[in-house]
Image (cartoon, grey):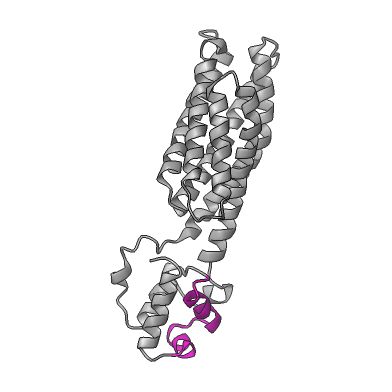
Amino acid sequence: MKQPELGKKISEMRKAKGLTQEELVELCNLNVRTIQRIEAGEVTPRSYTIKALFEALGIETKEFKNEPNIEINNTKLPWLYAGLAGGLVYFFLSYFEISMEIEWLEGALLQKTNFAWVKIGTLLTFSLFLLGLKKMAEAFPNKILKISLLLMIVFNAFWITIDLISLLGNSFFIEDYYYVKLASFGLAYGFMGIGFMTYKNLWSNIPQIIGALGIVAGVLIFSVIGALFGLIPLTLFELGEIGFLIWGINKIGRTSSPDSTFSSQVSA
């Protein structure tokens, strides 16, 4: 059960018991403002808060044990922060990677070892960014987006590994696989864009705008010949994803965190 339904249910149970909010406060050691916000659907209470309320109201908590939306979204916040940090670092690091990769393609790359470290940094930060977005797709359920992010994680790890082998060895060259690499990334970006497009009634229509940018970038990159032009919508797409993470951090932090005054009043 999710908000505001949960708040309405608690309010109905309280009234059925003939209790005022002030009387309920005395039974569960919360404060009036907390109960008001929960009943109004302004916050999603933590599991121990729900348990305290149900016990005070004489309701068996096992009735709600299988409700999928009573979830501690706070556990996802560290991942979202990590994903945001990874995304910001990746956003700037990717420009070094792209410029050095162009030099590599043109045979003008001089510092291969430095480029290898940039590739490793890109692998780590982009993977962290994608994992943060995956947690968003779990907090705000979206199977298509979740699958597309997993696909991108696999593609990214695979192609950077191939790049490193090619860069530091002589078994094959980037020209041998570069078009396939671009096409696969284009496919993954387009799939991610479709995932964002499937969001409904979430953060106005911004996910749809992000999704459209992802699809356009994916199509251009997939075409190979339009890959250079695809960098424009791709940049906007990735900025949109960073904004999506920031929105998610604020949303989850606001709706799943109770008032600080009762976090110390109720034991886990």
Closest to the observer: 92 or 186? 186
Question: Where 220 falls versus 17 (above or below)?
Answer: above
Magenta-tinted stretch: 20-42
Residue 55: give x, y in percent of width and height: 36, 80
Q: Is the magenta stretch mostly helix, strand or loop?
A: helix
- In this rendering, position of residue 225 left or right of residue 199: right
In magenta segment, residue 39: yes
Splitting the image into 4 quarters, where does residue 116 fall?
Answer: top right
Residue 146: give x, y in percent of width and height: 44, 43
Residue at 41% across, 71% down: 6
Residue at 51% across, 69% down: 43
Question: Where 208 falls versus 223 (above or below)?
Answer: below
Residue 196: give x, y in percent of width and height: 50, 44
* Quadrant position of the N terminus in the picture: bottom left
* Quadrant position of the C terminus in the picture: bottom left
Res. 137 in view: yes
Question: Where 173 falls versus 131 (above or below)?
Answer: above
- In this rendering, position of residue 43 left or right of residue 52: right
In magenta segment, residue 121: no
Res. 52 in view: no
Closest to the observer: 180 or 126? 180
